[in-house]
Amino acid sequence: MVIAEYSKDHTGPFWRGLAEQYTKSTGTKVDLQIVDWNTIDQQVSTMIQNNQPPDVLNLNAFASYAKDGLLYPAADVLSPKTREDFLESFARGGEYKGTLYGFPILSSARAFFYNTELLDRAGLPGAPRTWEGFVTAARKVTALGGGVIGYALPLGPEEAQAEWSIWMWNNGGDWKSGETWAINSDRNVQALAFLGDLANKHKVTQVNPGKTNRTDGAFQLFKDGKVGMVIGFSPLAKQLDAEGKVKYGVGPMPTNTGTAVTLGVEDYLMAFKKKGNQEAVKKFLDLYYQPENITRWITAEGFLPVTRSGLKQMSGDSKLKPYLDLLPNARLAPTTDPAWDKVKLDVQQSIGLAVQPGGNPKQVLDRLQQNATAAAR
Amino acid sequence: MVFPAVVLVSASLSRYSITGLHQGAVGVRNYARLLEQEALGTVAANTLVWVGLVVGVTLVLSLALAQLLNVDFPGRRLVRWALIVPWAASLIMTAKLFVWIYDYYFGVLNRLLVGLRVLSAPVDWLGDDATVMGAMIAVGVFVSLPFTTYVLLAGLQGIPGEVYEAARVDGASGWRTYRSVTLPLLRPALLVAAVLNLIYVFNSFPIVWTLNDRNPGFGHDTLITYMYKIAFKSALRDVGLAAALGVVNVLLTLAAVLVYLKAVRWREVEA
């Protein structure tokens, strides 16, 4: 089993506990590996090259494995009850050519975080809702001086595609237009140029945003109280509450189109076809999807539910309310397209270049579009 | 020893899906595609600068350090032990430590230099394109110094005292003695240090990888980290192409070593 490390405190203990429970009830031993996000893609690729794929894998992409015929479809390894419990949009997000291969494991929605103290000091009435209001707010916060940053923009290789997609969608653009890639559409070039301006013209971001990552860069600065606004998610809120240093608020994204859109992320569990493992895998997946198990883990990590039963159980949590409210307007990345795996990596590696001084947004997006269309063939 | 080499070559002649699944043989197509990669020129140039400067600076500094440690002074044993530390620590740990030292917002280096008024404003050592290479080379030299110094120290201690006596009797000054007596007698040790460093620095992965981690694109990669990115981290996700570069890297290392050995042996025969 290969599981991604969502947090140092909760991921390990939960899965080890689950593995013990499973071994006790079935007698089969579980070889559990918890791998951090920066290396999990390499690890899985190496395992497959060596013809030693995991039986169960947790990852944020699945379609290329489905395309290569490596996975069990849901009908083979999930009980009907589990399958029916999935929330509609998340189940659809796990389908390849109409069959469910990527089983939703948890979800998250991004929200707009703002430091209430800094915004007050800058004389702002509240969090901005439009892009113009956003630029004004960022400038005023940066003008406070003392190393304060208006907006922390992480476009470094860790998860640039997440940050980028939110800005892209809030300008009315999208990854695809119908079935074809449209990465370099005019609206997208406009949005990327906007981000470049934030860094180079208005100078309201941290230094070198194209080279800053989320976790050790943008989030860290926000947690230190140095940043006015950042795009974050529920685990960040948990950390902020635990540290108690920063007074913050959570709201919808500033938008240029009138409707705020946010990113919904769905991670997947998938089962690799190996001789004789179908029953064992089925029992393990049933164990995880028991409402008490899956909800316990999702709550501990601070993420959002993917099942109807989970949603009902967690809707009483007031801390999660902002994200649960955003969920209906949350869009998923095009993870059902096998080419997305390559596009995702391409975006991570290159989009930061567009916001450097002298960077060329149109050129970067053109290249991404070129590579995406080539990958799709 | 042979099996991994065989697997590498066979991988370079195959095609792989982006998941890692082997999909059949394709002859030398991967090598052709390698030459088409537009980042290859920059990466090759970076590698030349990286190897050249790290090995060069390390040798010069190590000559000085070895000279220092050859003289008996109080506390010498402590200094000798302290010198081992950068070598004993894992490269990843050292590299991660330097990522934080170099950090623009949280790093000790900026704090120190701005506080001492050496700099007027903090510098983004790892983000600014002008300073990244220098920052990485500094760390490369730092971790190569211990080994090289000890090799040269051993060489120095192998030089018999009578040679220095003779030079002094002949009236040679300190610097003249060093140039005409010490250095030539150090040649075997210098050779060992240079060749081993050349191979090791060329193949060095952790330092460049960790320090360059936050930078998009391939602007500061060396051939080794570029190879890794081709396999796992870039849009290419192509194991076959990466294996082809791997074979090229091995051949380059062998070639460099052979050329070096030939040049030195030729000069020794002459002498």
Image (spheres, rainbow, N blue to C red):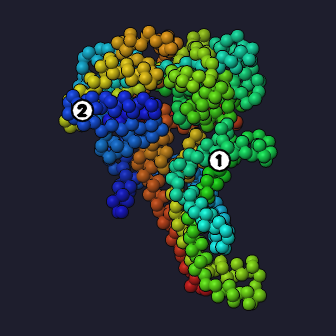
Disc number placed over residue B132 in the picture, else none: 1
Spatial CA span between label 1 and label 2: 50 Å
Which of discs 1 and 2 lies nearer the camera? The answer is: 2
Q: Which residue is under mark 2?
A: A23
Q: Is residue A250 left or right of residue B25?
A: right
Q: Residue at x 46, y 33 (%)?
A: A8
Q: Residue at x 45, y 42 (%)?
A: B232
Q: Quadrant of the N terminus of chain B?
A: bottom left
Which sits in the foreground, A311 or B244?
Answer: A311
Which sits in the foreground, A154 or A31?
Answer: A31
Disc number placed over residue B187 in the picture, else none: none
Which chain is disc 2 placed on? Answer: A
Tell me where residue A85 appears, x and y as whole percent.
Answer: 32, 14
> Mark 2 packing: few (<14 Cα in 10 Å), some, or many (20+)?
some
Which sits in the foreground, B54 or A287?
Answer: A287
Q: As shown in the figure, which amino acid type bears the numbered disc 1?
A: Val
Tell me where residue A61 appears, x and y as whole percent.
Answer: 41, 30
User: Height in image: B72 above or below A239?
Assistant: below
